[in-house]
Amino acid sequence: MEAIEAILTRRSTRQFKDDMPSKDLIEKIIEAGRYAPSGHNSQTTHFIVIRDKLVLGDMAELVKAEFAKMDVDDDTYASLKASITASKSGNYIFHYGAPVFIVVANKKNYGNAMADSACALENMMIAANAYDLGSCWINQLHWLDDNQAINSFMLEHGLEKDETITGGLILGYPASGLPNRQMVERKGNPVTWD
């Protein structure tokens, strides 16, 4: 698949088969993230790969419990509000049952932490599409980055004390077989020419 085709046909996947992609294939996806640009070529983005079903299950239960403790008000943005509301109802699995969760972290107080991580996540999503895997950017751990329970859990699973969680990526084989690659018309993201 050509690069532009992989970019234009990438869609988020939220239903996965239980089948685990090979370690070699996961490494190829991560390598695409590792080759993303970074401010001053700092290369401080950290990829924490979680493939253990028990760890994923524990993480999902913890995230659900921590969101359920939160309140929603008029200033709560829509996607966070949806996570909190679903958690309170008790049927919330934020990683959609994907067999692989790649937590992305970077250095605390590093001005380019989010930008560097975003570039890495996008590279991995495009690579996943090119390799016929489904993926979806997951923000819930980032939203809970200051949460003591989440922080303690992630420190046990590879997060360093001087790091902040900047995002996450779920990865696996789409339930439908191949990723949805239907082109979707862009109605937003305006362009201004001078």
Image: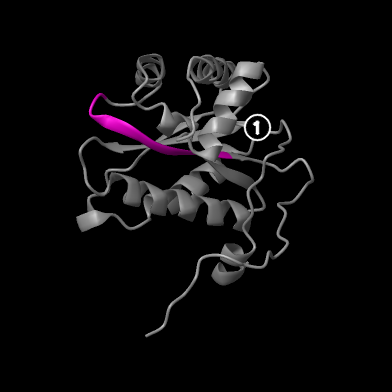
Taking the image as shown, residue 61 lies to the left or right of residue 45, namely right
Q: Is residue 5 above or below residue 46?
A: below
- Percent across and percent down for residue 82 are 59, 32
Residue displayed at 66% across by 29% down: 97
Q: Which residue lies furthest to the right in this view?
A: 176
Taking the image as shown, residue 21 lies to the left or right of residue 109, namely right
Which image quarter holds the N terminus? Answer: bottom right
Q: Is residue 116 above or below residue 193?
A: above
Main secondary structure of the magenta stretch: strand
Q: Which residue lies furthest to the bottom in this view?
A: 194
- Percent across and percent down for residue 26 are 54, 42
- Residue highlighted by disc 1: 96
Q: Residues within 10 Å of mark 1 (few under 14, many from 20)?
A: some
Q: Is residue 127 above or below residue 142?
A: below
Residue displayed at 26% across by 49% down: 112
Element type where label 1 sits in the image: loop
Is residue 190 a member of the stretch shown in magenta?
no
